[in-house]
Image: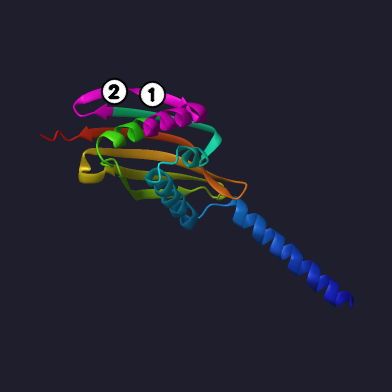
């Protein structure tokens, strides 16, 4: 009887350790799933869904250019990033009414490199993004160095440093 109890305790302890490990560590599969999830919320135009993928202490920077015009580097935290994303989608939705759903979004990404820390709690990801509207009316290309973390069973973006180019095609 004692052996059965010890075996049951060992199984429960092993299961708990496995569960804790899976919830708190990063893997390539979890990182790829994160970027797939980013694509889903971008294409669904869900700014709140995108905000849920950012760590509470998220910090980002972006140097963007619009066509030939080079913009200044901007720094932002989670609140600022979420507000900017909501404003962008509000503009897209307003423009969409005027151009018959031309602004359906198509997202793709390419992972250039993944470095997972030895403790598997953080990862540095070199990633390239592309976000285009239907007919490629507008194309957003971005290259980013992201820091991802695992927290409460979720993969979250802690830090990003990106360079973005926005191109708009003039249609006559």
Q: Does 18 sit above or below residue 100?
A: below
Q: Which residue carries the number 1 mark?
A: 74
The foreground one among 42 and 70 is 42
Span highlighted in magenta in the image: 65-90
Q: In which quarter of the view is residue 70 placed?
A: top left
Residue 145: % across, % down? 39, 39
Is 101 left, or right, of 67 in this rendering? right
CA neighbours of label 2 inside 10 A, class few (<14), some (14 to 19), many (20+): few
Residue 137: % across, % down? 21, 39
Q: Residue furthest right?
A: 1
Q: Is residue 71 magenta?
A: yes
Quadrant of the image containing the N terminus: bottom right
User: Which residue is depicted at the point 45% across and 37% down?
Assistant: 47
On residue 145, which mark appears?
A: none
User: Which residue is depicted at the point 29% across and 40% down?
Assistant: 103
Disc 1 is placed on an element classified as: strand
CA neighbours of label 1 inside 10 A, class few (<14), some (14 to 19), many (20+): few
- How far apart marks 2 and 1 lie (CA) works out to 9 Å
Quadrant of the image containing the C terminus: top left
Q: Is residue 133 magenta?
A: no
User: Which residue is depicted at the point 79% across and 71% down?
Assistant: 8
The foreground one among 59 and 43 is 43
Residue 92: % across, % down? 33, 34
Q: Residue furthest left?
A: 172
The foreground one among 68 and 6 is 68
Q: Which residue carries the number 2 mark?
A: 71
CB within 8 Å, label 2 to label 1: yes
User: Which residue is depicted at the point 13% across and 35% down?
Assistant: 171
Tell me the colour scheme of the image: rainbow
């Amino acid at each position: 009887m004692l052996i059965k109890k010890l075996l049951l305790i060992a199984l429960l302890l092993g299961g708990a350790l496995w569960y804790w490990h899976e919830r708190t560590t990063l893997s390539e599969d979890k990182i790829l799933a994160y970027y797939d999830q980013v694509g889903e919320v971008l294409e669904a135009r869900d700014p709140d869904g995108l905000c849920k993928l950012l760590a509470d202490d998220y910090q980002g920077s972006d140097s963007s250019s619009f066509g030939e015009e080079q913009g200044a580097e901007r720094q932002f935290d989670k609140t600022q990033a979420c507000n900017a994303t909501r404003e962008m989608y509000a503009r897209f939705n307003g423009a969409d009414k005027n151009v018959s759903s031309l602004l359906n979004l198509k997202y793709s990404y390419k992972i250039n490199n993944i470095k997972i820390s030895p403790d598997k709690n953080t990862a540095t990801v070199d990633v390239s993004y592309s976000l285009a509207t239907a007919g490629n009316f507008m194309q957003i290309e971005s290259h980013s160095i992201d820091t991802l973390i695992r927290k409460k069973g979720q993969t979250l973006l802690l830090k990003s440093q990106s360079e973005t180019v926005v191109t708009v095609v003039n249609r006559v």
